[in-house]
Amino acid sequence: MNYEEYSKQSFNNLVKVQEKFKEAFEIDSYANWFYDSETELLRLYDHDDEIYFKYIPIGTYSLKSATWMWSWFNNHSIEKSRSELLLVKEFGIENNYEKLHNGTFSSDEYDGWELSSICLHFVNGIGIYKVNTDELDKYMLITDVIDKSSLEIKKLRQKTVDCGNHGYSRPAFVCQHLNLETPKGFEEAFETYLGMDLDEDDDFQAWCSECEKVRIEYNGWNDESEEFAGIKLVCENCYFELKNFNQQDTFG
């Protein structure tokens, strides 16, 4: 069987699985998502409801470079379960299916669903979920629904911020001047996008243009520049709302 035939067969099976998945858990009713790479937990939520899933990372599609990258090829990923998909890679090598054993390649957004359907055949799962960000589409193989009272969820909540607007999500830090009323510029410790994986020692950190002037004046962050900045804790979603607003042209 050639790759086109095999992938079509797998995709047709995915369509049936996805229908049951969406119906059973009402996936489309949740407007927001949050995932934690360390625990490999996906949270879907609205203001009055939430559900948690265990996932295996499949791969990502870059919207900028139009390329696919398998999770097992991503050296920056801390998600341990990505190694489970090496079975798919080995199968690709045995059958000369290049898309299954090349770590990264030029692609389009449809490949993500096609490749996810093949992974579903090798790893027992209940569905596929795609996380959309400004930079990447991240595909996840959902393996199980997790009880909200479980120890895993309790540990996740201990390391996240409980935001009144967005619920539990990763912590972020911004200066006291950034708000959603008047654009004040947005300086970051490093370039970021919503949902990106962070190294263990990294945090989302940002400050306004005035803080940047003070930081330069005092040759970096020290008691004086930090006092002016008045850094405060927010959640990841609030951080990117502030980023989108404050990066607007302050001169109109």
Image (spheres, rainbow, N blue to C red):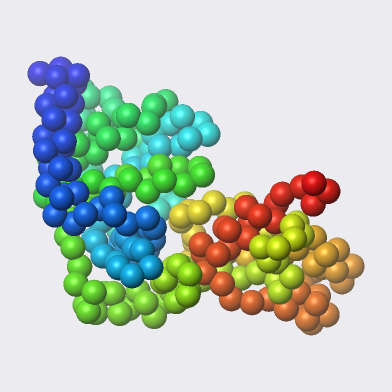
Residue closest to the eye, 216 or 64:
64
Q: Which residue occupies 29% across, 67% down? A: 50
Q: Residue 77: percent from the left, percent from the top?
A: 40, 53
All told, the count of numbered labels is: 0
- Vertical relation: 5 (above or below) 147: above
- Vertical relation: 205 (above or below) 70: below
Q: Residue 208: percent from the left, percent from the top?
A: 75, 63
- Vertical relation: 79 (above or below) 229: above
Residue closest to the eye, 29 or 62:
29
Name of the residue lying farthest toward the right? 217
Q: Is residue 72 left or right of residue 5?
A: right
Q: Residue 93: percent from the left, percent from the top?
A: 21, 29
The picture quadrant where one finds residue 12 is top left
Q: Which residue occupies 64% across, 77% down? A: 232
The quadrant of the rendering that contains the N terminus is: top left
Using the rendered image of the protein, determine whether residue 187 is visible from the camera's viewpoint.
no
Q: Which residue occupies 70% across, 66% down? A: 178
Q: Residue 172: percent from the left, percent from the top?
A: 56, 69
The picture quadrant where one finds residue 144 is bottom left
Q: Is residue 245 left or right of residue 134?
A: right
Q: Which residue occupies 51% across, 62% down? A: 237
Using the rendered image of the protein, determine whether residue 218 is visible from the camera's viewpoint.
yes
Residue closest to the eye, 28 or 214:
28
